[in-house]
Image (tube, rainbow, N blue to C red):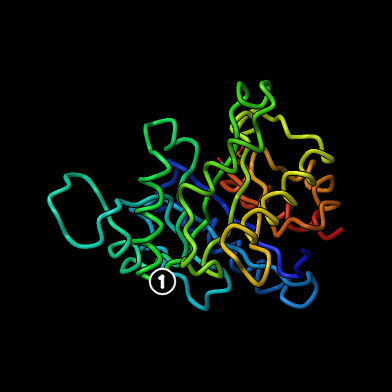
Amino acid sequence: MTNKLKYFIGNWKMFGDFSDFRIVQNINQFSFRTKSSLKKKKIILCIPSTLIHYFNKNLKNKFISLGAQNCHYYQNYGSFTGAVNAKMLKQAGAKYIILGHSENRSDGETNELIKKKIISSLKLKLNIVFCVGETLKERKKKNTFQVIRKQMTKSLIKNFDVNKIIIAYEPVWSIGSNKIPKISDLKKIVKYIKKDVKKALKLKNYPKVLYGGSVNSKNIRLFSSVHELDGFLIGGASRSTKEFIDIIKNYYK
Ligand code: PGA
């Protein structure tokens, strides 16, 4: 269940402009400098769609990857005002895409719609960061496992290439709140997700699972004891070069 390669994925959300290229450049430099000293790590920054092409074009010698944060489900061009599909994001330079984030689920995105987006992104060979997680109300009702299971089984299907899908467990109540789950609870949930998806999709290996929700350079040490985790989806803290780099450094301390 434990993999050596750890993912540190930034989710910039609806923040950032062209001048933030320096953040990307600095993190890219850091990734290069620590190639041998900080064991196996993969850094990905999921940025606003409007910045992908510019950042991708200007970043020389890429030691990190760029990703998008959502897409329209339709694979071809179509009359969908304001929408951007996986093909357009791939063309702009995205290698990864976050799908099923709770901020989009709370805007009306259903499990069925997320499945369509996964299908369309997989066709384009994008790597998917598929988010699942329970709300505070669901947690209080002790429905966490049930909720996650439903999100996974309704959006993931057997013939998906799960090598291209990373599951991010993000309890909704922990996003941007400075609250994190108890480490013992987190361990249980991560193991559950790995076992459940392996069984449901009849996989040979366990899928990769990340944790997301208020990860910062101070609490990252707590998470490093959860060996089953394959990395982190980092929101607010990924918009500061220093904080993001400190998270990675402190993880390996
Ligand atoms: P946060 O966001 O790290 O700011 O809590 C995580 C996310 O929404 O992916």
Residue identifier under label 1: 125
Q: Quadrant of the C terminus?
A: bottom right
Q: Residue at x 37, y 56 (%)?
A: 51
68 on left or right of 174 = left
97 over 11 or under it: above or below: below
Crowding at label 1, few (<14), some or many (≥20) Cα neighbours within 10 Å?
some
Q: Is residue 189 above or below residue 252?
A: above
**Residue at 35% in and 69% down:** 123
Say which amino acid is labelled 1: Lys
Mark 1: which secondary structure?
loop
Residue 125 percent location from the top left of the image: 41, 71
Image location of residue 9, percent across then percent down: 59, 56
Q: Looking at the rendering, in which quadrant would you find the N terminus?
A: bottom right
Relative side of 17 to 102, left or right: left
- Residue for point 69% across, 30% down: 178
Q: Quadrant of ligand 1?
A: top right
Closest to the observer: 18 or 144? 144
**Tag count in the figure?**
1
Q: Foreground residue, 162 or 60?
A: 162
In the picture provided, is 94 more to the left or to the right than 238? Answer: left
Name the residue located 59 percent from the left edge and 57 percent from the top edge: 200
Residue 116 x %, y %: 35, 53
- Residue 147: x and y in percent read 58, 36
Q: Tell me: is circle 1 under 8 Å from ligand 1.
A: no
- Single out the residue that lies furthest toward the left: 79
* Residue placed most toward the observer, 56 or 177: 177
Is 4 in front, or is 116? 116
